[in-house]
Image (tube, rainbow, N blue to C red):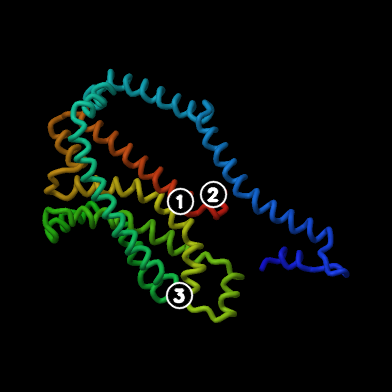
Amino acid sequence: MTAIELTSKETTRGGQPSLVETSTHLSALAVEAALPAAVRRKRRQKRLAMLHPRFWLPFGVVLVVLGWGWNIGADKMPYLLPPLGDVFGAIKDEPQYFLENAWVTLREALIGLAIGFGVACVLAVVISESGIARRAIMPVAVVLNVTPLVAIAPALVVAFGFGAAPKLILTSLICFFPILINAAVGLSSVDRQVLQVFQTVNASRWEVLRHIRIPSSLPYVFASLQIVFPLSVVGAVVAELSAAGSAAGLGTTIQVATSMNNMAMVWAAIFVLAVMGSLLLLFVTAVERKILHWHESQQ
């Protein structure tokens, strides 16, 4: 029972609620009923604002300027920049080829991201719960982060063959460190007063982790996902370029087209990768808004 309901139950000397108490209770109910409507109205206004020219016109102008500059560069450096018509024509002529190779790269990116995310989250929990584990794991993670992973790609190929394993390992290693750092910071960024309340009622570590630490870490985790979702595509392409034996994927497409001096195909694959990374970023942003609707960053 809320404090407002308790107040509304307080009676006057005659046993009936006073006029002030009744009005207070009705006002509180009105506010609670109006809040979802206000939120829906605000979201509707945001969607309508996206249709206004002031929202999309600056981006459209930038695209036009970039396209104009691209064609000027294509006239002066045809060996580097093909005309935009040739680039989009390559995609239009072979859409099935680009879709199949994009799916291979996307699958490698998402599986590698899932592996890196799972390992990083488990280690972040261990680090947040144990100072000894933090001192043992973090130096290794930092060394791994500063190591040029491309240099170890040949060793991975020797160890795991020419299949998907080396590419998944490289992609997961590229995504691992940002998630580990953000998750560890989020798990440690707990409101001390709330933590003290849980400690006074003898809450277990699991209860503290489930009800306090994990919810407080979600904004940090989603911040890292906004980085690593597009980065996973980059990691998959780097893995395809570095780990020999790739038969498909946009990285392999770029490699083969470069060897044939087909710059239109190279830039077409790069454009597909850019669209893929942008869509992944939009996806994780939408999920963040859905899950963290209660957080002040989404208000």
Q: Residue at x 33, y 66 (%)?
A: 140
Of the pair 32 and 244, the residue shown nearer to us: 32
**Mark 1 element type:** helix
Question: SS for tag 3?
Answer: helix
* Label 2 SS: helix
Distance from label 1 to label 2 (Cα)? 9 Å
Q: Residue at x 71, y 56 (%)?
A: 28
Residue, disc 1: 288
Q: Is residue 80 above or below residue 285?
A: above
Look at mark 3 in the image and give the residue it sits on: 206
Mark 3 neighbour density, 10 Å: few (under 14) some (14–19) many (20 or more): few
Tell me the kind of residue under disc 3: Trp
CB contact under 8 Å: marks 1 and 2 = yes
Q: Earlier in the sequence, mark 1 or mark 2?
A: 1
Q: Amino acid at mark 2?
A: Gln
Q: Position of residue 193 (x, y in %)?
A: 61, 70
